Image (cartoon, helix red, strand yellow):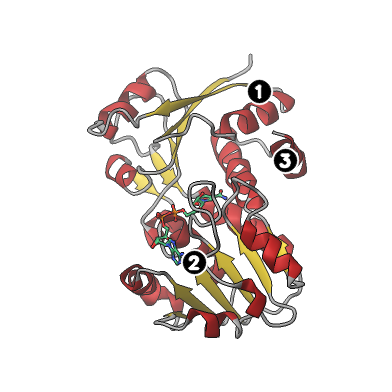
Amino acid sequence: MSTHYRVALLGHGIGPSLTPALHEQEAALLGLDYRYETVDLIGDPDVDLGALLTRLEGEGFAAVNVTHPFKVAVLDHVASTSAVVERIGSANLVLLDGTGDPGSPHRRAHNTDVTGFGAGLVAFLGDRPRGRVLQVGAGGAGRATAYALLDLGFDEVVVHDRDPVAAAALVERFAPTSGGRMLASEDDLATWVTDVDGVVHVTPMGMAEHPGVAFDPTVLREGAWVAEVVYRPLETELLRRARARGADTLDGGLMAVGQAVDSLRLITGREPDRDRMTEHFRAL
Ligand code: NAD
């Protein structure tokens, strides 16, 4: 007898998301009976998230992925969190247990943005030095990438945001566990760009609604790399300009696929084929 999985993505403006197709195709190839639905709550600004989770649980949903603007708010409605979620204060996956009991210990929050980005970056970095890295952007996704950068053992993680309060808050969040390895860039971004082994770009710049670049990659030093999280489009102006400068680049697709791989594994207990999912993502 095969188990039937029902999963939902909760967020605002998620109609065009590629995640449902990514999950469903891989689940089908794993022989699973698996349905992934989107629940776009943009028209419901006062949604009662707790009641919604309880309803979905009652309807037999096994899990929900959550995206903007619920990644922090959802934590008020779970019984337990992974260690990563506890540290960064944000989740993108909640496992449900089908009982409809909001206090169930099985209603557990995870963050696969962290593990998804980390796995992509590890593969990309190979034996490149893990010295000083610059992260541009200190918003929601920036919490996940910052965790991964510290976890990957960089000596120094410099955080820049055009809002200095956001950069300082991120550094403060990690202060108890970063061992002094994370600092805010303060002001002169261009100087930092010339002085790091690599840059992780985590702002919306480069998306159709936010054209342009958050920093000038032409001043990168020889051998420095650029990792992007924007994946719509996959080829951002930043990546184009960084490659023209001779830098190696990682596009945002690896994080998008990585979070789906790790979500699917946590939901089903089965091992997805990362290469196959990457190929599928790039064909979507
Ligand atoms: P957010 O709004 O929470 O944070 C963005 C941060 O960038 C803000 O702090 C803002 O002040 C800063 N910023 C904006 N423009 C800047 C600039 N020019 N220079 C410096 N800082 C600037 O957004 P978020 O949730 O962190 O998402 C950021 C991007 O990450 C989005 O474009 C999203 O598409 C992408 N993302 C990708 C994945 C993936 O799987 N690849 C996952 C999550 C988010």
Work out how far the residue at label 3 is from the one at label 2, CA to CA, in angstroms. Answer: 26 Å
Pinpoint residue 146: horizontal percent, then vertical percent: 49, 66
Going 74% across and 26% down the picture, which residue do you hit? Answer: 29
44, 71: nearer the viewer: 44
Q: Residue at x 49, y 29 (%)?
A: 15
Q: Which mark is residue 146?
A: 2
- Label 1 is placed on what type of residue? Leu
Residues 243 and 96: in front is 243
What secondary structure is found at the residue carrying circle 3?
helix
Confirm whether residue 103 shows in the render.
yes
**Which residue occupies 42% across, 26% down?**
39
Q: Amino acid at mark 3?
A: Arg
Single out the mark in the foreground, 1 or 2: 2
Q: Earlier in the sequence, mark 1 or mark 2?
A: 1
The reply to whether discs 1 and 2 touch (Cβ–Cβ < 8 Å) is no
What type is the residue that disc 2 sits on?
Ala
- Outermost residue, top side: 1
Give the mark, 3 or 2, whose residue is nearer the N terminus: 2
Mark 1 sits near ligand 1, with its Cβ under 8 Å away = no
Choose the circle earlier in sequence order: 1 or 3: 1
The label number, if any, that marks residue 32 in the structure image: 1
Q: Does residue 122 show up?
A: no
Inter-mark Cα distance, 1 to 3: 22 Å
**Helix, strand or loop under label 2:** helix
Dot 1 crowding, Cα within 10 Å, few <14, some 14–19, many 20+: some
Estimate the x, y position of residue 1 in percent, counting from the top left. Answer: 63, 14
Q: Is residue 255 above or below residue 57?
A: below
What residue would you read off at disc 3? 282
Quarter of the figure that contains the C terminus: top right
Residue 81, horizontal then vertical, whole percent: 39, 49
Assess disc 3: are there few (<14), some (14-19) or many (≥20) residues with their C-alpha within 10 Å of its C-alpha: few
Q: What residue is drawn where x is 59% and y is 72%?
A: 216
